[in-house]
Amino acid sequence: MPGEIDLFSLLVPGLLPILAGCVLLFIALDLVLARLGFHRYTWHPALFRVALFAAMFSSASLLLRQ
């Protein structure tokens, strides 16, 4: 995967598609977890959400950007 992607004559960072995919996956996962009431069992729900997104994005970027 190149460092930059040409998107309609605009150079964007190569991590942008990974970020967009992680955002969509995070929204879906957060809705499922909220519907199941999982956030009641976490110490700080907002901190858990940030940590979950950071873990998802960093894992995906490390796996896909080799």
Image: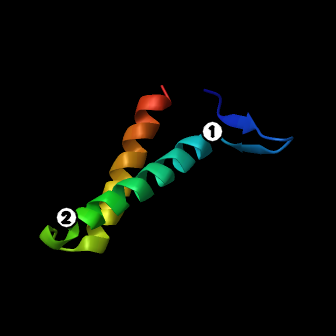
Q: Callout 1 environment at 10 Å: few (<14), some (14 to 19), or many (20+)?
A: some
* Residue 19 placement, left or right of 7: left
Residue visible at 21% across and 69% down in the picture: 39
In percent of width and height, residue 17 lies at 59, 42
- Colour scheme of the picture: rainbow
Name which of mark 1 and mark 2 comes first in the sequence: 1
Residue visible at 84% across and 41% down in the picture: 8
In percent of width and height, residue 19 lies at 53, 48
Inter-mark Cα distance, 1 to 2: 33 Å
Residue extending farthest to the right is 9
Residue visible at 33% across and 49% down in the picture: 55
Q: Could you tell me the amino acid type at mark 1?
A: Gly
Note whether 54 is above or below 46 in the view shown.
above
Q: Which residue is mark 2?
A: 38
Q: Are marks 1 and 2 in contact (CB under 8 Å)?
A: no
Q: Which residue is mark 1?
A: 14
In percent of width and height, residue 3 lies at 65, 34
